[in-house]
Image (tube, rainbow, N blue to C red):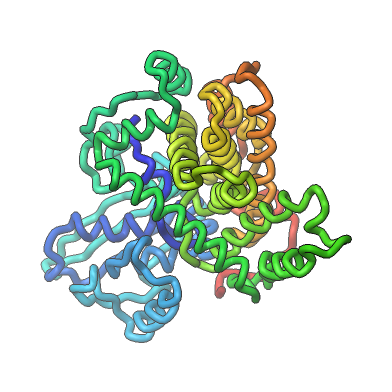
Amino acid sequence: MDMSVFDLFKIGIGPSSSHTVGPMLAARRFLLECGPLNGAVAVEVALYGSLALTGIGHATDKAVILGLMGETPQDVLPDQVDAKLAAAEAAGQIRLLGIQAVPFARASGLTWHTTESLPEHPNGMRFTLRLADGNCLQRVFYSVGGGFIHAEGEAQAGPLDQAGAAAAAKVAYPFDTMDQLLEHGRASGLSIPQMLRANECVRISNDALNGGLDKIWQVMRNCIARGLETRGQLPGGLQVQRRAAKLWAMAQSAQGVANGCNDLPHDAVHKVSLYAMAVNEENAAGGRVVTAPTNGAAGIIPAVLRYYVEDCRPIDPVTGVRDFLLTAAAIGMLCKRNASISGAEIGCQGEVGVACAMAAAGLVAALGGSNEQVENAAEIGIEHHLGMTCDPIGGLVQIPCIERNGMGAVKAITAASLALKGDGAHFVSLDEVIETMRQTGADMQDKYKETSLGGLAVHVITVNHAAC
């Protein structure tokens, strides 16, 4: 497996990993690979397929411009994005990679090809850099889900990391299927998180791995906290009100009251759904999130992790959180390699479904379950999301995305509970259900795959979002 846990969990901004994070990375990488920019006089970007159909709602235009300016998803300050873009628009120019100023206006510099897709993936974009001598440099990139990108032809050239360099490290426990990972476990006597740790430590030190995992969890925790405190209306024109903070305040005020909701058996489930919704409200507002494995499904894993830390009362929560993330990453790697985590490619089963499976598997591992129980939990998580469409109203990751994360988090806990109460034996394997997800996505009509051309997106009347 040529992926790292930090490929699956990337710090970025909302509202979308494939439509915001990926295009920002692609724009910046294109310019970096163009060489010296002192002869540049213009830049143009053409967006195709799903990027064009839902791009404004997913802030693709903003992300591309930020990437051209040299910003990165992990470092850009969400609170400064709108001011930075407004200043560039007012000036009628952008400074490429912060170095070379060229004329640029969003209306003319970006072209939206809503009826055309490029051959390798629905999320395609073509960059053109025009030079003073009359020549131009041009390249096509694809944003393939979860913030992963590749240039045209790279998918066939072999495993590549995000910088475009060949992945050369030989890991201790290579696996392309769950069966292979389980066999490694039986032969070595190691748990899934132990094997993933050994694989990661081929690339980085154990201390660096722990530090990176701890940082991911801290960003997730911070995102939940912000979402549980922030009220108001989400941007985009749907006039959707944030609900997590209000519902959280109601739950807190009722705590300890004899007939309050915190005395009811379902209270822990209610809190978990609010954690997930809080994250995805932050994501919808363009806030700081962690792709897990995508932005559209970013709330599920943080919600179940907080449930683990606060409600499961672990003896060693620090180790448990690290094992959770390593195990979740293993499931995400398998899904990305053998199917997809892109809503534009296979629908929301590849986003919320995969995140549910990752969270369920991580929770089982953190609670001391066997490798076979981990696999069972992940399989349950995907199986009960098969066929889920990606049909965001108005191209915005608000309805049904926010609530869908709350439901996915609850399903993950249920899947983990079922797996832990069994002995790991089950009828459908994880490898089989991942392949089923891939085939289901291939059979799904394009209008149900992040185009806003089907499902709820066309059966609910919305405002015109083009000016939002």
Up/down of 167 relative to 308, above or below: above
Residue drawn at point x = 24 percent, y = 44 percent = 164
In front: 145, or 422?
A: 422
In front: 188, or 151?
A: 188
Residue 444 in sight: yes
Q: Position of residue 364 (x, y in %)?
A: 57, 33
- 414 relative position to 185: left or right: right
Residue drawn at point x = 50 percent, y = 60 percent = 55
Q: Position of residue 151 (x, y in %)?
A: 30, 45
Q: Position of residue 77 (x, y in %)?
A: 39, 71
In front: 268, or 168?
A: 268
> Which corner quadrant of the image does residue 95 belong to?
bottom left
Residue 457 in sight: no
- 39 relative position to 332: left or right: left
Q: Residue furthest bottom?
A: 90
Up/down of 281 relative to 183, above or below: below
Q: Residue furthest front?
A: 315
Q: Residue furthest right?
A: 259
Residue drawn at point x = 62 percent, y = 44 percent = 312
Split into 4 quadrants, where in the image is the N terminus? Answer: top left
Up/down of 192 relative to 9, above or below: above
Residue drawn at point x = 42 percent, y = 53 percent = 216
Q: Position of residue 133 (x, y in %)?
A: 11, 67
